[in-house]
Image: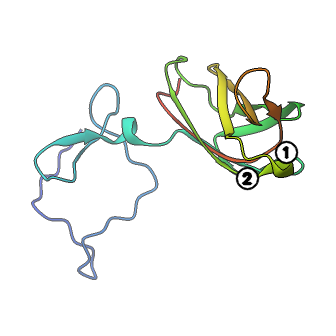
Amino acid sequence: MSTIKVDTYLTRGGASEIAIDKLKGASSASSISVVAEGGTNTTNLQQGLCKAWAFKQSSGGGITDSLNMSSIDDDGTGDYGLNYTNAFNNVAYIPNQNIRGGVAAGNSDGHFAEVQTCNTTSAECQTWYGDAGTNATFIDWEVRHTFFGDLA
């Protein structure tokens, strides 16, 4: 294997950008470290990337756009599952959701979206308004989901 050492890489046109289709770190995990915003610390590129996201419609319950999502399953009003194309390594990943919905039927109670169960291949989700107890009314809301963690 050959090694090329340079201080600065420039294209023939003088730009310092590189066009590349695949980039892989040299460590055993193919990890790539990048200099963080402050200029002195480094962060791991793979660890900081969003590994899956989905924009779920309120009406019809389908996915408008997504990354690493193979399908959505409708388990009833305000109850659905998001299925990943590529599985997570374990269930210790971070789900996040942002709900968008108006006040339903004049109800001014809170509006909620929650990932109920994280599996390596899917996430089971619910959306409702009211409180989380017996007064909850399940409804299909527009939800934006993001998932951070290690892929298998």
Residue type marked 1: Gly
Residues packed near mark 2 inside 10 Å, few (<14), some (14 to 19) or many (20 plus):
some
Along the line of sight, the residue nearer the viewer: 63 or 42 = 63
User: Residue at image x 12%, y 52%?
Assistant: 5
User: Residue at image x 20%, y 43%?
Assistant: 2
- Seen in the image, is 36 located left or right of residue 108? left
Badge 1 is on which residue?
61
User: Residue at image x 50%, y 25%?
Assistant: 93
Q: Secondary structure at mark 2?
A: loop
Residues packed near mark 1 inside 10 Å, few (<14), some (14 to 19) or many (20 plus):
many
Badge 2 is on which residue?
101
Q: How many marks?
A: 2
- Farthest residue in the bottom direction? 13
User: Residue at image x 75%, y 55%?
Assistant: 102
Q: Is residue 75 shown to the viewer in this render?
A: yes
Along the line of sight, the residue nearer the viewer: 135 or 124 = 135
Quarter assignment of residue 115 = top right
Residue 39 image position (x, y, % from top left): 13, 53
- Seen in the image, is 51 located left or right of residue 29? right
- Mark nearest the camera among 1 and 2 is 2
Residue 70 image position (x, y, % from top left): 74, 38
Taking 98 as reference, is 122 above or below it? Answer: above
Residue type marked 2: Gly
